[in-house]
Image (tube, coloured by chain):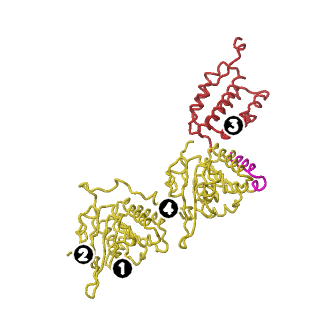
């Protein structure tokens, strides 16, 4: 079944991004998205079983990869999503990667929303709004 | 999930499920071999399949796919185009199950799910996994993983299997699934009986009754009179003075005995022993209604053929052929050996609605329900016949044959409790002759005549003599 996509998730993701992303470098931005995806995955585990979350994450990755093949190195594992192979790739186009991870984050929220009849949507959006990259102090002084 | 319910396309099943299968649920179709599980699932599959809502049909070891396809072609719901364009896809898991076991089978199943992204997934049969699992734990883990994976992909899933009541109580699969639909078949009095029951369905209210069904060239036809034949409160036709609208019969001076007339929506028993004139009175009721009032009438006969009834009407001098030609009268003959009560209740409902009949005769109601042994079930079926008449806001005459010498006013002794009126036809020996009598025994909310009135059957119809 194709994913029913709600605009509410994309709107929320873009609102969150507009507050958190502007002072980040091109390299840091995809990492913020990856952090957000992991936060959503972790928050889902408070309510859903690990097997369920694994299947949902796997589906979201599968669906997103169809449009963004550069996400192929991502692995969904019982311990959580593993982005290491993705970020280790040389010559990464960070702008493209940011777009792909944004799509994955929205897809994950869509699938979770659909499967839980949006029962988890409000807490997941709240979780998302709390995701930031805290820069190291010495970097901030620069 | 966008759509809340999935229409099954199986007559009356959506009514039983109060709106269809809940989307994204996992339902088991349980039943013995030959009970209709596969046909039911295929019927639902072909109804719903489209290039945007694909169906994946997994075959396990129970029936080879080639065999399934061959039998499937004989049903009218089968659509070759849906196979050709990939809307319905069959996948045989038999080989991998035989050689590599459950884990590989799950992996292959999910590979197909990810590739096709189906709206519907059907596994026929799921019971085979129970036989292939090395332990109860392995079966539990496998069932759980199948359920979670298909849920994660929002597939509405049907798992078919020869599951018994014991399986439902003990098989770990049944603690995971959302719905159980049981299908049974057995022989009773030399006739095949098929029953469908929704035992459980999360996310919806549903009928918990057993419903009879047959398998026809169109697939399953479920007869669910308790669900589909229901009285409509407040639907009674009212007259100008705010009382119920009433019908006149114009049969001799019967109207003068019936007070203000018979309220529309009412059903009356025409009760009597053989030879008292029940059929001819009922036939005249239909004929006068059509000829004198332009009211369409339908006569369901289980004893006399349509030809014999028409001949009888012609012999009375009635121009019944004209009324039949105009579409004002229909005579439907169902040989009593072929009666299937719930199937024919539904057929009567359809015919009455299609014709917009205002007059209905059941000749006889006692033959119609004669195979039912339980008096409460007889009462329920007579009530449902009355409901058909109430739904049409017509007048129903239900003929009931009583045994000669009996003091009962109906064959089974329960029919009179659910009808609105009773006309008793009797006969007595007078000298060397036997004379017929008619008595209005009961007519609700109507000030009717009492006492017996001599009834004659003559050229032209019934004639009543008042005394």
Residue B99 magenta-drawn?
yes
Labels 3 and 1 within one chain: no
Tag 4 subunit: B
Q: Secondary structure at mark 4?
A: strand
Please name the residue that numbered disc 3 is placed on: A61
Please name the residue that numbered disc 4 is placed on: B223
Residue B433 location in percent, x, y?
Answer: 28, 86
Letter of the chain in red? A
Labels 4 and 3 within one chain: no
Please name the residue that numbered disc 2 is placed on: B453
Tag 2 subunit: B
Which one is closest to the eye, mark 4 or mark 1? 1
Magenta region, residue range: B95-113
Using residue B443 as the reference point, say whether residue B401 is left or right of it: right
State the residue at coordinates (66%, 63%). B70
Using residue A32 as the reference point, say whether residue B287 is left or right of it: left
State the residue at coordinates (63%, 61%). B72
Disc 2 from disc 1: Cα separation: 20 Å
Letter of the chain in yellow? B
Neighbourhood count class around disc 2 (C-alpha, 10 Å): few under 14, some 14–19, many 20 upward: many
Disc 4 from disc 1: Cα separation: 35 Å
Using residue B342 as the reference point, say whether residue B325 is left or right of it: left
Circle 3/circle 1 CB separation < 8 Å: no
Q: Is residue A28 above or below residue B329?
A: above
């Amino acid at each position: 079944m194709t994913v029913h996509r709600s605009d509410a998730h994309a709107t929320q993701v873009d609102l969150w991004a507009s507050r958190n992303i502007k002072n980040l470098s091109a390299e840091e931005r995809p990492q913020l998205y990856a952090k957000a995806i992991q936060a959503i995955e972790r928050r889902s585990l408070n309510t859903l079983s690990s097997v369920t979350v694994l299947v949902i994450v796997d589906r979201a990755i599968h669906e997103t990869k169809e449009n963004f093949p550069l996400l192929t190195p991502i692995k969904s594992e019982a311990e959580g999503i593993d982005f290491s192979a993705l970020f280790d790739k040389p010559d990464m186009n960070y702008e493209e990667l940011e777009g792909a991870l944004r799509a994955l984050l929205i897809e994950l929220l869509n699938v979770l929303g659909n499967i839980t009849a949006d029962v988890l949507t409000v807490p997941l959006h709240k979780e998302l709004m709390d995701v930031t990259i805290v820069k190291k102090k010495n970097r901030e002084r620069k | 999930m966008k759509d809340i319910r999935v229409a099954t396309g199986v007559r009356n099943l959506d009514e039983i499920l109060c709106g269809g299968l809940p989307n994204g649920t996992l339902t088991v179709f349980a039943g013995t071999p030959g009970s209709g599980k596969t046909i039911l699932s295929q019927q639902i599959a072909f109804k719903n399949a489209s290039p945007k809502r694909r169906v994946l049909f997994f075959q396990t070891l129970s029936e080879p796919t080639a065999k399934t396809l061959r039998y499937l072609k004989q049903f009218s719901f089968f659509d070759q185009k849906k196979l050709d364009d990939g809307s319905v896809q069959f996948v045989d898991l038999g080989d991998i199950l035989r050689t590599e076991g459950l884990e590989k089978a799950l992996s292959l199943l999910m590979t197909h799910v990810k590739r096709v992204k189906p709206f519907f997934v059907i596994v026929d049969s799921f019971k085979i996994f129970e036989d292939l699992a090395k332990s109860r734990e392995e079966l539990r883990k496998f069932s759980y993983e199948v359920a979670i994976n298909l849920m994660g992909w929002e597939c509405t899933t049907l798992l078919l299997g020869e599951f018994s009541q014991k399986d439902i109580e003990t098989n770990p699969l049944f603690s995971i699934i959302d719905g159980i639909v049981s299908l049974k078949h057995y022989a009773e009095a030399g006739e095949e009986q098929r029953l469908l029951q929704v035992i459980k369905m999360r996310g919806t209210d549903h009928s918990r009754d057993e419903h009879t069904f047959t398998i026809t060239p169109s697939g399953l036809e479920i007869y669910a009179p308790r669900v589909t034949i229901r009285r409509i409160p407040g639907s009674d036709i009212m007259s100008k003075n705010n009382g119920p609208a009433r019908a006149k019969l114009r049969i001799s001076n019967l109207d003068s005995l019936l007070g203000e007339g018979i309220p529309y929506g009412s059903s009356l028993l025409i009760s009597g022993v053989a030879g008292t004139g029940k059929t001819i009175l009922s036939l005249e009721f239909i004929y006068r209604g059509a000829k004198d009032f332009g009211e369409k009438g339908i006569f369901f006969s289980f004893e006399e053929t349509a030809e014999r009834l028409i001949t009888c009407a012609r012999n009375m001098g009635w121009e019944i052929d004209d009324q039949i030609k105009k579409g004002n009268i229909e005579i439907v003959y169902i040989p009593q050996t072929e009666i299937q009560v719930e199937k024919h209740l539904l057929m009567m409902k359809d015919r009455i609605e299609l014709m917009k009949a205002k007059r209905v005769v059941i000749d006889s109601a006692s033959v119609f329900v004669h195979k039912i042994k339980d008096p409460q079930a007889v009462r329920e079926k007579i009530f449902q016949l009355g409901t058909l008449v109430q739904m049409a806001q017509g007048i129903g005459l239900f003929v009931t044959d009583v045994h000669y010498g009996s003091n009962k006013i109906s064959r089974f002794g329960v029919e009179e409790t659910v009808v609105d009126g009773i006309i008793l036809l009797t006969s007595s020996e007078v000298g060397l002759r036997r004379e017929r009598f008619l008595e209005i025994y009961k007519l609700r909310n109507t000030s009717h005549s009492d006492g017996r009135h001599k009834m004659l059957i003559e050229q032209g119809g019934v004639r009543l003599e008042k005394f």
